[in-house]
Structures are given as C-alpha cells and as structure tokens.
C-alpha cells in the first residue's frame, strides 16, 4: 500500500507587470507531476536546478498551496487525507507525520538555541512531557552518532556535517511516517556527504524510513533510493527502479544527467558528452517536448507534440516519443 500518492500536481506562480500589477503570464514550476511512495521506500526526485523539485516538496509539506492536483497521504490511523486541500485546522495534527531535512544545515538551526532545545522543540510543540523530551533527545543524539554533551552546545560549535546530523535528529523526533530530504548533502564537502549518506542508509535499515530524497546529483542518489523520478521543467521525464534507470535510461534527459556523473577512473570516457544548453524557461516552455531544443534524438514530432508519461515496460515510465526505440547509454 502506498504511503503517499501525488496525482497531477500543479503549482503555477503568476507573473505580474504594469502599474496595476495585472497578471500577464504564469511560471509553471510544477505542471502535472504524478508519483507514489510506498511504506518503507525511498524515492529520489532529481533534475537540474529550476526544474521544480523543491516546489514539489514544499507542496507536499503544505509550505506552498498547490494550484491543483491531489497529494494523498496515509497517517497512522489508516485513513487517507489530501494534503493539497485539507483545511489548516485539520492539517496541524498531521504535520508530525511529515518532516523535512533542509538543504542548509546552518540556516535551518536557530543559532540562539542549544542543540538539545532544537531537537526537543517539535516534542514540546506536540505536548510531550519534559522528562520524556530529555530522554528522547539523548536517544536521538545517539541515533545520529553525536555525543550526549552536544545537547548543551550551540550550532556554531559544530561542523557542517554535524549540523546536518542535528537537523536529521530533529526531523526524526516525532517518528514521522515520511521524511522529505531537500538536497540534504549538497551544501557539504564530498567526504562529509559520504558520512551523511551512510547515516541515512543506516536509519533506513533501523527505522524503515519512507523518504522523498530531492537531489540534482545522480551519483548521490544511487546508493540511497529504491526508485528514481527524473524531472524536467516542471514535468516528469522518467520514473524507474534505481538499478534499471542507471543501467538503461529510457529518456534522453536521464541519459544526459548520467553522462554528467564524474567517472572514478580518469581514463574512462562515457559514450557521449553531457548535454549542452540551459534548462528551458518554465514561464515560456518550448512547444512540444520541453527537452527537444537540447535533445540529440529529437524528430519533427518532438517539436510539436508534447509526450505524456507512459509505461514503456513493467514498472518503468517515460515521457518520450522514442523511449522504446532508442538505445541510450547508462552507467554500471
């Protein structure tokens, strides 16, 4: 059974101009995205900057209100609620079930609060008694591999990786059913990235976490995710199991992202160069397939007809007219 189902999600931002600030256009940041996350599963949401990944995560958390679509979520009681439309008074009790790990591990922590108070804050808001809060803070510090003495120190006394561990502990304080990790390692050094990835892997095994892992680097998500969803200009380009996607992508944009992953062997060269050009403007997307101006496989049909996301083989979906005829290069 799916823990989260996102169906035809759209988030459009108005463009206003003139003295009267009339709406003259729209930025289609998210334009009909659909995916699901099963209980205990990690779905990676990847794509270049500006493709709409963070907007999707903010809509799931209701930090932003979706323009249309459904975000069906199953809390612990087994009922299904639509996070996109549920009234605010009914939303607050559900927030404990969906928590977020932020991209910037320093900006997300209050510099005037001690670490113990930061981790305990969601517990305090939800009415957990003081004695239980203290015990839970110690348990969480041990879980993220920080010493108990860390609870009496301030965020500035920690490294970037340690601050992210504090952020992870805070996100896990209420035993959420879903964790949204918005590029949790992109602001960290490469060596520290590996430590945080290993920590998340350990937490997945121990807590059976369900996670939406947002990233722009395919080399990061390979070891964390069960499935990968690739976004481009507000729409899904491909959704597939992780191993299958890396082995044989079905969308040229996915192939381009894989080509951009650095090879550990300097003498090893990929089958093709990374894609050139910039991400299309979501306020003025090109006609047809939004990727066709950058796609080496584009044909006339791609320039006039927008492809829909369709199942090209069992468990694999792609929005490309030529998904079943092209032989694209993956990585091993």
Image (cartoon, helix red, strand yellow):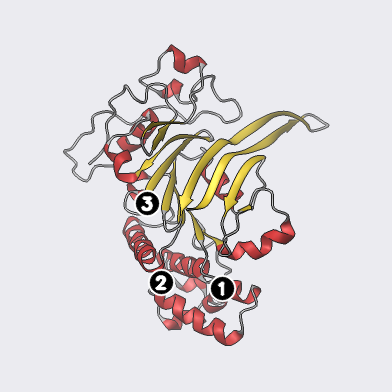
Q: CA distance from mark 1 to mark 3?
A: 28 Å
Q: Which residue in the rendered view is the most extreme toward the left?
A: 267
Point 38% across, 46% down: residue? 227
C-beta proximity under 8 Å, tags 3 and 2: no
SS type, badge 1: helix
Q: Nearer the viewer, residue 332 or 96?
A: 96
Q: Which residue in the rendered view is the most extreme toward the right?
A: 20
* Front: mark 3 or 2: 3
Q: Position of residue 120 (x, y in %)?
A: 56, 76
Callout 2 environment at 10 Å: few (<14), some (14 to 19), or many (20+)?
many
Circle 3 residue? 225
Instruction: First in sequence, mark 3 or 2: give its number.
Output: 2
Q: CA distance from mark 1 to mark 2?
A: 14 Å
Point 55% across, 66% down: residue? 109
Q: Nearer the viewer, residue 295 or 229?
A: 229
Q: Nearer the viewer, residue 127 or 149?
A: 127
Say above or below: 188 vs 137.
above
Q: Is residue 268 left or right of residue 22?
A: left
The image quadrant that residue 257 belongs to is top left
Circle 1 residue? 118
């Amino acid at each position: 059974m799916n823990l989260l189902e996102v169906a035809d999600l759209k988030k459009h931002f108005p463009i206003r101009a003139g003295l009267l600030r009339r709406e003259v256009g729209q930025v289609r940041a998210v334009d009909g995205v659909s995916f699901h996350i099963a209980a205990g599963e990690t779905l990676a949401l990847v794509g270049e900057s500006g493709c709409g990944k963070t907007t999707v995560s903010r809509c799931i958390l209701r930090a932003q209100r979706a323009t249309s679509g459904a975000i069906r979520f199953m809390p612990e009681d087994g009922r299904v609620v639509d996070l996109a439309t549920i009234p605010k008074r009914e939303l607050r009790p559900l927030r404990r079930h969906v928590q977020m790990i932020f991209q910037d591990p320093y900006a997300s922590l209050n510099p005037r609060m001690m670490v113990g108070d930061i981790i305990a804050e969601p517990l305090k808001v939800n009415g957990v008694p003081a004695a239980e809060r203290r015990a839970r803070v110690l348990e969480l510090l041990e879980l993220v591999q920080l010493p108990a003495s860390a609870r009496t120190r301030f965020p500035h006394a920690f490294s970037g990786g340690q601050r992210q561990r504090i952020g992870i502990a805070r996100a896990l304080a209420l035993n959420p059913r879903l964790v949204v990790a918005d590029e949790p390692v992109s602001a960290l050094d490469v060596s520290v990235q590996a430590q945080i990835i290993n920590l998340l892997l350990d937490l997945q095994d121990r807590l059976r976490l369900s996670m939406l892992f947002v990233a722009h680097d395919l080399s990061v998500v390979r070891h964390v995710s069960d499935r990968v969803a690739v976004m481009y200009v507000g729409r899904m380009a491909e959704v597939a199991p992780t191993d299958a996607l890396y082995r044989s992508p079905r969308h040229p944009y996915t192939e381009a992202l894989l080509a951009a992953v650095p090879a550990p062997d300097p003498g090893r060269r990929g089958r093709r160069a990374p894609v050139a050009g910039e991400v299309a403007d979501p306020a003025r997307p090109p006609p047809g397939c939004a990727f066709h101006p950058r796609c080496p496989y584009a044909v006339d049909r791609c320039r006039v007809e927008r492809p829909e996301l369709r199942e090209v083989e069992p468990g694999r979906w792609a929005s490309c007219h030529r998904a079943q005829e092209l032989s694209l290069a993956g990585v091993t």
